[in-house]
Amino acid sequence: MVFSKKRSFTMLAALLMVSLLLSACSGSGAGSRTAGSGETSGSKTLTIMAETSSHADAFKSIIPDFEEKYGVKVNVVELPYDQYQQQLKLKFVSEQVDFDLAYIPIGWVPEFQLANYIVPIATEQAKLDELELDDFPGIDNAYFGADKQLYFLPYMNETHGILYRTDLFEDAAEKKAFQDKYGYELQPPQTMQQYKDIAAFFNRPDENLYGVTLMGENSILSGFAFYNRLFNYGGDLYDDNYKQQFNNEAGIKALNDFKELFQYASPAARQYGWSDASSEFLQGRSAMAEMATTVAQMAQDPNQSTIAGKVGFTAIPANDDNTSDIKRFYLPYGFVMTKHSDNQEAAFQWMEFATSQEMMEKAAPVGNIPARTSALTGSLASEYSFYEPHADIMNSFRLETLPLIPEGSTITGEILPNAVVKYLFGERAAEDALKEAETEFNELMKSRGY
């Protein structure tokens, strides 16, 4: 489908909620990736716009290394979450573009690319080869435009998964009791049925321990739980013709699966958002939590977690152990290059340098989750226990970004979460909740010319 002129410049910030998630963030690789070895670019200053975040802190930490290597000064202009996108758009629209690179969620790229605010990172194959793109899971999603050129270079990828208490899962008495009750070994769940069994086994409210931490707040976060289960059953948000694919048997089963798990969660979980849910798990009040890699990172910090050093991470399971064609959303942040930059060669050098395996490994402890498989499975893997499982998720499932159409944020952040919450609270039957969501979806898409 070709975007109409009416919709071309009205991107609805498809990943604003994703930006909020990532702001909270305080081996099948292509081999060792080291910092680039390009020639120096002379005495120049490279300016990068970024949202204030721990992953921005991470790439700022390697600026001295870049400046020493290339003789180019780097200036990072940071803005808070609630101002960043607006200010970025204002600069582009007014053509007051006083920066060379922007660090953004991938959801903003289509609007900026369509409006010709940004340019391809490289078009020559030799330059693209320098970036060792095969080391980035999901890199196919970084190509935009009719001729599918590379406009986005990932720096941080986030996935959703299951955090679990290794002190409980590896306890000999717990393992024996579980084996005796269920007839198989206690280990991170590989199927949805195992997930339910383990949640039921550890659900001990009288011991201030719940089987699983879930989020039922009306937001994109409850939406994620539904989407993962919808994909497990072969459903989707919409097809290639933008016709809904969720009001069906797959959608009903997905809602039922999600609601069933709440019987092993805190009674307050239906009201939980990000803060409440992460707090519950990090304080050791549940055996598992269905959350994102950001929380896995927080769980390793003894200043934020009472269970530091006792947390593992695994994928949201499919219905069986075959994940090769199961879709999963992931949340990439990365760099784009502005059309107005006078330092495009230096901008390319920065992107090559900052996203190298060597520099990603150096910067990660400051607050980033590297986008390269080689950085996730390299020297830091033993220190950050969730890195390798995260890499496995990124390379085992069919990765897709949240919808990059302008209506994507309304669909994933409003229409479908509304349906999920109505069902969780008993306000609608599953069939009725999904039928209402279908009606809202159809009205939205029709109003936008689909």
Image (cartoon, grey):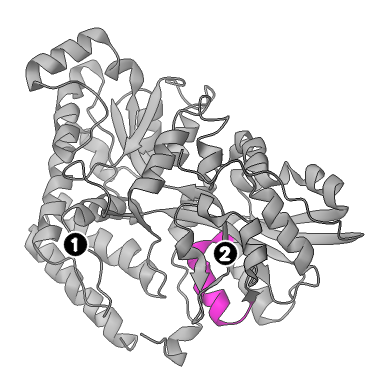
Residue 412 is situated, as x and y percent measured from the top left of the image, at 32, 63
Q: How many residues crowd mark 1 within 10 Å: few (<14), some (14–19), many (20+)?
A: many
- The residue lying toward the viewer, choosing from 98 and 27, is 27
Quick check: is 113 in the magenta stretch?
yes
Q: Which residue is mark 2?
A: 152
In the image, farthest residue toward the bottom:
5
If the image is split into quadrants, where does the N terminus sit?
Answer: bottom left
Q: Which residue is mark 1?
A: 235
In the image, farthest residue toward the top:
173
Q: How many residues crowd mark 2 within 10 Å: few (<14), some (14–19), many (20+)?
A: many
Q: Residue type at mark 2: give it.
A: Phe
Q: Earlier in the sequence, mark 2 or mark 1?
A: 2
- The residue lying toward the viewer, choosing from 273 and 379, is 379
Taking the image as drawn, is residue 292 in sight? no
Does residue 91 appear left or right of residue 389 in this picture?
A: right
- Magenta residues span 104-117
Does residue 379 appear left or right of residue 348 in this picture?
A: left
Quick check: is 348 in the magenta stretch?
no
If the image is split into quadrants, where does the C terminus sit?
Answer: bottom left
Residue 401 is situated, as x and y percent measured from the top left of the image, at 40, 61
- The residue drawn where x is 18% and y is 72% is 438
| On screen, residue 302 above or below 120 | above
- Majority SS type along the magenta span: helix
